[in-house]
Amino acid sequence: METEPWIETVRRGAWPWAWVWGPGLLVMLADTDAGSLITAAQSGAQWGYRMVLPQVILIPILYMVQEVTVRLGLVTREGHGEAIRRHFGRGWAFLSAGTLFLSAIGALVTEFSGVAGVGQLFGVPPAVSVGLATLLLIAVGLSGSYRRVERIGIAMGLFELLFVVVAVWARPAWGAVWQGTVFIPWSNPSYLQLLAANIGAVIMPWMIFYQQGAVVDKGLAPTVDTLRQARADTAVGSVVTQAVMVAMVVAVAATLGRTQGHASLDTVGEIAGALEPFLGHWVGAVVFGLGMLGASLVAALVVSVAGSWGLGEVLGFPHSLNHRVDEAPWFYAVYTAAHVAGALLVIASTNLVGLTVDVEIMNALLLPIVLGFLLALEARALPAHWRMRGMRRALVWGASGLVMAFGLYTLFTL
């Protein structure tokens, strides 16, 4: 496949970073999905600004874990499932693929629930809104170009920045924001329960599969300069996604949190309905709805691509977004089927809130398996000079242990 002239200019010209950047930003935008945003809204309503500081602390944790996937992809030139199969055997690879499949279907249910909720804000039935979103996402995936999919995904995800507009429009008292970051009720069980829900959803199985696979599918070279740029891409993505989470916490804390701290905010409609009296229809429903729609669509895109890559890596069938449909029929069949399955589950469900809770519980159970494989691969698959050492290794292991612990803690508090 020939390289487009403008791409070659970017790669060799004054902006080589533009050739490398993308996987980190895209996967982080997908991390701030409908379920995460609903959790952030609940945090702002129940605890005001006291959940702002934990969101900031999560930035380096996100970065440290996902940076490992970058190095694995660059050095091994293998996706996550393929690397597990080669270093630990087919049985363990199937286990990893099983966790990915469950996580991906669960995430797609959450994202399509978000799409359905946004549609209902404007009187569109779930069957119509979810159906149209499904067709759009399938068409994007079938475009036959990784870079095209990446650009479209980032464009969708950047709509999440509208939540910053919502937060500013809510006119928060910045002195109260600062106080909320200083006085944290660490000993309160209810606060810890919601904190666990926020932390337990930070690292998803599909995030690890996606970013490692994206590094390979994008054709990034295993050089020190490429690693430096890929790290910067991941770092910026970590800041952006958590800035969006902070914006949601602040927007709800500055409005609903002042008057109705224990209001139910389990769906997109409930959040928009609660914000509208304070912010007006335009900001409380339209701007908020566009942000939620972007978050749901980019997450659904990334999740389905990650799931298709992972199964292709484990089962050995062609699995590149750069292939045509006839070159990778199984890959595109899995990609399409995942969307259709997630959409049908949402359209047929009468309890979308219950589905979302079930997804949170499942992801918490999968965290030890996913992060365990990631750390084991880092220690075995990478040459010695590419591995973590000293304080860096201790920090990454500690951050992974924290995420796993809070994820499992969620099981006992939901």
Image: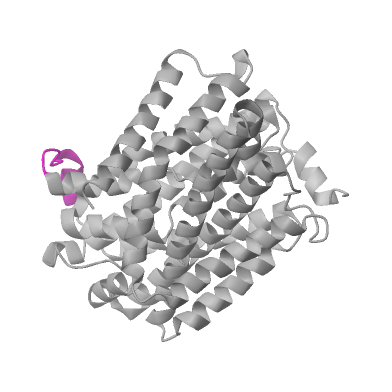
Residue 277 visible from this viewpoint = yes
Q: Residue 334 appears at what percent x and percent y?
A: 65, 59
Residue 382 vs 109, above or below: the answer is above
**Residue 332 lies in the magenta-colored region:** no
Q: Dividing the picture into quarters, in which one does residue 247 lie? A: bottom left
Residue located 36% across and 70% down the image: 352
Residue located 36% across and 39% down the image: 58
Residue 174 visible from this viewpoint = no
What's the coloring here?
A: one colour
Q: Nearer the viewer, residue 102 or 297?
A: 102
Q: Residue furthest right?
A: 2
Q: Residue 396 appears at what percent x and percent y?
A: 42, 26
Instruction: Provide the residue span drawn in magenta.
Output: 176-188
Residue located 76% across and 40% down the image: 11
**Residue 177 lies in the magenta-colored region:** yes
Q: Nearer the viewer, residue 232 or 121?
A: 121
Q: Residue 348 appears at what percent x and percent y?
A: 44, 77
Query: In the image, is 176 to the left or to the right of 94?
Result: left
Q: Nearer the viewer, residue 50 or 131?
A: 131
Q: Residue 146 appears at what percent x and percent y?
A: 71, 52
